[in-house]
Image: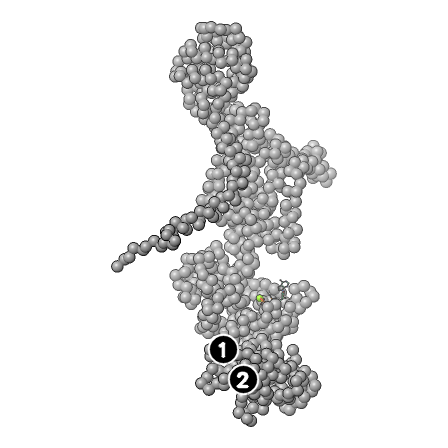
Amino acid sequence: MATVQQPIIIDGRPLKEQLARAERRKKYVAFAMVLPLLLFILITFAIPIGSMLFRSVDNPRMITLAPQLTAELSEWDGQDMPPEEVFEAAVKDFKLAAEAGTLGRIATRVNYSMAGARSLIVKSKRKFKNVTEGPYREVMIKADKRWGELDTWKTLKKVSVPYTPVYFLNAIDRDLDGDGNIVKQPSEKRIYVKLFVRTLWIALLVTVLTLILGYPIAYLISTQPPRISNLLIIMVLLPFWTSLLVRTTSWIVLLQTQGVLNDLMVWMGVISDDGRIQMIYNLQGTLIAMTQILLPFMVLPMYSVMKTIPLSELRASQSLGANPFITFFRIFLPRSIPGIGAGGLLVFVVSVGYYITPALVGGAKGQMISNQIAFHMKSSLNWGLAAALGTILLVGVLVLYWLYDKVVGIDKMKLG
Amino acid sequence: MDKSAREAYVSFNNVQKSYDGVNLVVKDLKLDVQRGEFMTMLGPSGSGKTTCLMMLAGFETATSGDIILDGDAINDVPPWKRDIGIVFQNYALFPHMTVQENLAYPMQVRKVSKSDIEDRVKKALGMVQLDGFAGRRPGQLSGGQQQRVAVARALVFEPKLVLMDEPLGALDRQLREQMQYEIKHIHENLGVTVVYVTHDQAEALTMSNRVCVFDDGVVQQVAAPNILYEQPDNAFVAQFIGENNTFLATVKEKNGDQCVAQVDTGETLTALAINIGQSETKTTLSLRPERVTINPNAGEFKNVVSGKVKELIYLGDHIRTRLELCGQDNFIVKVQNAARHSHLLEGETVQVGWHIEDCRALDAL
Ligand SMILES: Nc1ncnc2c1ncn2[C@@H]1O[C@H](COP(=O)(O)OP(=O)(O)OP(=O)(O)O)[C@@H](O)[C@H]1O
Ligand SMILES: [Mg+2]
């Protein structure tokens, strides 16, 4: 006969409840311990990333700077020429903005989506100055006949929505036409897809190069007694101790056409004085410098994995009849894969977002997507596009991470 | 050492080994192992056992001297061509392979046909009672099971010789004893030659045909377990194997195979002269605790002295009795807990006696 188990009661309370109370205290303590870090990460990481993601679709400028116009445009269906109220709102908002000194920002925003819009708006500003009453439509068309074109108003409506996919579309060389269809950018403006591909390609090349160069070093270090291996580790880490800028500059000194390496080769007669090789300010320069800088990121995780492969396993393999070659491929290499994975992922992810080195030694051909992001952040001030490019980069890296997890398994990764 | 006409299967000929060029870790090692023998190297930590094994396996080179396997000097043969199976202390199974793959590995590298491999893996798993575990990875096995896989892997390719370096060191006592018997039975069934390393003397005595006792890189004695226990050649072996009572004494006279020695408190004792110098030199008299009789009949023994009971420890089947006699306050006697055993009291003075043949005069420690 089955008996129903009675809950155990201690001091008049069920055991379960008491256990939960005891555990809760522990949880609070644990939470309190991570709280400072949590706040720090929230403020310095989560919020900025979130705001960046948001900025890539956010479109507040027209709404705040030209509120009447935005409101009227949203009423308009966008099929035929807009009604008089839209023209009126446009003139009034532009006048107000001109007084407040914000018209330039409106012009810039419209200009992202329509070439020439900036000069159109700035030019019209003067002509609207003295207009106080309608019909506004005629006033505007008289000021510039482009105000009479449907496309102009469609563009205005497009840039006046609160949330826009345009930044993302621009980031993949697409745009919205006046009717809201996704179209390709004109060919001279199609640069980002090519740049993304190049960025991935450079990151892949750097990963492969650091792997090829780093694997033997990691192996060597892992087989040395601690005294020597510590020394070798310090040498691997040595680049970290000098400023990135100094190192990059030294590459310039070394690699430029009039640089040390070319001089040396000319002096030795390997190349003629006219045949100096361009090794920097191009893709090659970016590759050389990044490989050198990122090598430690590859070596350290691989070393930390290789170090844990016991000598006895390799000896066991040999005693079982496998020569060192077979032993390497069947035992050592498979055992070191978690290190290769960790190092590879690390180098790849870091190189995908690399900025300063390509900027300094990359020339035109060695630029990466981050350089464009920086350009839009600092020079063109198109933060929406910068945010969209950054978001795509972030998502791309996450996808890669997910793929890695599917193929190799994250739990196999060992970072130290 | 047994210099019989039988040719040795494995032999170390005057092998020396130094790691640093200053100290010899193995000194002038001469050791023969017969075909099919279970030879154990026994010695305290750091005595050079692993070093010897690694020289045999080919992972360390002998600084001088020859190592012979089956008639050939193998000094210059690389490990993967020596055909020697090894069981490592930490098992050294390949964690990224299944049990099946681990066992198949030595045959795969020897290019054995697939069906043969399967048969032999199956048989090997049966031998260590692990049928049905072929698909598991080492990480999914208990320590004892991993141990069995390691043993199976070292045997599955029918090597000329199997080396085991403290293979049971990581197991708990009960499992260790069980595995001792299993390995012993596997050895008996297969007739394979085994060189086994341990620092556990009970393990060495249980499993081996012969035991080679090592100390400080020097072989102290090579003999069958019972000889080693009953007839140790020197004071180190007597101390190291089993429990032992010793007296430091001075040789007074030597009569054939016997001698008379005087302990520092004045008593004279007669013992077998095994390993002593001239008169007036020091000697260690060695006597097993179970060979001592308390309150013997008059005239039963030549050696009778009186001692004082210091401590009694009840151990069930026997009573461990600590006495003070001849200036030695740690003289142990095992009194059987039999029907008519003598009931002793602490502080009591008793007579103890022993046969001359049970007391061996050895080198002074
Ligand atoms: N690779 C090495 N380099 C230098 N010295 C070593 C090396 N391996 C062992 N030794 C030294 O050689 C001596 C013998 O070592 P070995 O490992 O053979 O001892 P062992 O008898 O196996 O001891 P244990 O029972 O502790 O395993 C020790 O003093 C040890 O310090
Ligand atoms: Mg050892």
Residue B225 spot, x, y in % from top left: 53, 78
Q: Which mark is residue A74?
A: none
Residue B282 position by quadrant: bottom right
Say which amino acid is labelled 1: Tyr
**Relative to B128, is A151 above or below?**
above
Q: Which residue sits furthest front? A: A11
* Chain ID of residue with mark 2: B
Q: Quadrant of the C terminus of chain B?
A: bottom right
**Relative to B119, is A243 above or below?**
above
**Relative to A151, is A135 above or below?**
above
The residue depicted at 71 percent of the width and 37 percent of the height is A260
Residue B191 spot, x, y in % from top left: 47, 73
Ranked by sequence position, the earlier of labels 1 and 2 is: 2
Residue A361 position by quadrant: top right
Callout 2 environment at 10 Å: few (<14), some (14 to 19), or many (20+)?
some
- Of residues A197 and B234, which is closer to you in this image? B234
Looking at the image, in which quadrant does ligand 2 appear?
A: bottom right
- Of residues B6 and A298, which is closer to you in this image? A298
Say which amino acid is labelled 2: Arg
Residue occupied by mark 2: B291
Residue A315 spot, x, y in % from top left: 55, 60
Q: Which mark is residue B314?
A: 1
Residue B98 showing in the rendered view: no
Q: Secondary structure at mark 2?
A: helix
Q: Quadrant of the N terminus of chain B?
A: bottom right
Residue A250 position by quadrant: top right
* Chain ID of residue with mark 1: B
The residue depicted at 54 percent of the width and 73 percent of the height is B201
- Of residues B15 and A412, which is closer to you in this image? A412
